[in-house]
Image (cartoon, grey):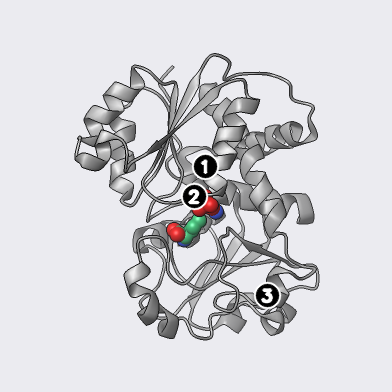
């Protein structure tokens, strides 16, 4: 059987994603007792900071009977210029699975191409598919099946927005993106999604949020964009999820944020701490969906 990677949301089929959510629920409830990672090691390469991704993968590997190895790219030879393809082949001789968080998506594709073990994308500048698995699992726990629902994305057309687009196309829900001109999601990802599901890109946050089942956002400047922070602060002025915007969504709507959040920028304290916020369920679900993902990739 060829190895399976998880670099972007469409790497699993709709049926596989649905099965993954069922498995994640069993894991969360404590009913699942298997140890598919027994005697195995997951290597985790990080070129960017992380709280949730690191902890959820490390704890998840342990709970599945395995071990996780934290590899900061500042400390391994990759950070001193050792080629990705050499790193991939060396680590594949010792590890059973790899997770990587880095800048360029092409680097993750290169790692996957040369690795003989499954590779998981733990965030690139282009995609954050593990987070979207957790987000959709959270939606389904609170609102039922996401198919046919409306999700409003407010703010930067970044890695999160791109993975939301991929997910909308695969699972059949509507995605409305409100972003300033020049900060739209990845063109290719958008073109692909819009042929498969209802999508909208607008500069109007109210148009996006109207009647939404889910309202979600992310920071104005992602990791690696710190130098653009000031410029982005003025470009994104008004792209804020506040109580007035939440009122335009359905009364049953929930608010999601992958975290870390900047209160007073993309979201107000009242919304993130408010009754519609599910951000901590969302963070916890990283653990459950990723354990299910590891088990799925191991077959
Ligand atoms: N949401 C998320 O990926 O968080 P970390 O950057 O803390 O891993
Ligand atoms: N868009 C953010 C997500 C962090 C989890 C970033 O890339 O920094």
Residue 269 disc label: 3
Q: Quadrant of residue 36?
A: top right
Disc on the earlier residue, 3 or 1: 1
| Quadrant assignment, res 255 | bottom right
Q: CA distance from mark 2 to mark 3?
A: 22 Å
Say whether residue 264 is left or right of residue 248: left
Residue at image mark 2: 50
Q: Tell me if residue 230 comes above or below residue 112 in the rendering.
A: below
Asked which secondary structure carries label 3, the reply is: helix
Q: Quadrant of the N terminus?
A: top left
**Residue 225 in the image: above or below residue 7:** below
Q: Is residue 234 above or below residue 79?
A: below
Q: Nearer the viewer, residue 224 or 70?
A: 70
Check residue 145 in the rendering and tell me which mark sits there, or answer none: none
Taking the spot 49% from the left edge, 54% from the top edge, the residue there is 163
Q: Do the numbered discs 3 and 1 sit on residues whose CB atoms are within 8 Å? A: no
The residue indicated by pointer 1 is 54
Tag 1–tag 2 contact (CB < 8 Å): yes
Q: Tell me how far mark 1 sits from mark 2, CA to CA.
A: 6 Å
The secondary element bearing badge 2 is classed as loop
């Amino acid at each position: 059987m060829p190895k399976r990677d998880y670099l972007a949301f469409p790497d699993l089929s709709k049926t596989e994603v649905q099965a993954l959510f069922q498995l994640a629920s069993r894991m969360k409830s404590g009913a699942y007792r298997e140890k598919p990672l027994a005697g195995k090691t997951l290597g985790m390469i990080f070129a960017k900071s992380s709280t949730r991704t690191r902890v959820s993968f490390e704890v998840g590997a342990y709970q599945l009977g395995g071990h996780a190895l934290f590899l900061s790219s500042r400390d391994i030879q990759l950070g001193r210029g050792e080629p990705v393809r050499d790193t991939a082949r060396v680590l594949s001789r010792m590890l059973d699975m790899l997770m990587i968080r880095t800048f360029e998506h092409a680097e993750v594709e290169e790692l996957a191409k040369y690795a003989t073990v499954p590779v998981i994308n733990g965030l690139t500048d282009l995609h954050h598919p593990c987070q979207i698995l957790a987000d959709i699992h959270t939606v389904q726990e609170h609102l039922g099946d996401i198919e046919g629902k409306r999700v409003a994305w407010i703010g930067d057309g970044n890695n999160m927005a791109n993975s939301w687009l991929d997910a909308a196309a695969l699972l059949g829900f509507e995605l409305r993106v409100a972003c300033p001109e020049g900060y739209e999601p990845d063109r290719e990802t958008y073109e692909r999604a819009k042929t498969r599901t209802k999508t909208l890109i607008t500069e109007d946050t109210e148009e996006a949020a109207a009647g939404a089942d889910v309202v979600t956002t992310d920071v104005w400047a992602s990791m690696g964009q710190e130098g653009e922070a000031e410029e982005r602060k003025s470009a994104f002025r008004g792209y804020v999820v506040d109580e007035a915007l939440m009122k335009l969504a359905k009364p049953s709507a929930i608010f999601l944020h992958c975290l870390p959040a900047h209160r007073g920028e993309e979201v107000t304290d009242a919304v993130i701490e408010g009754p519609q916020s599910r951000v901590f369920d969302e963070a916890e679900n990283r653990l459950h969906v990723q354990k299910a993902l590891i088990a799925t990739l191991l077959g």
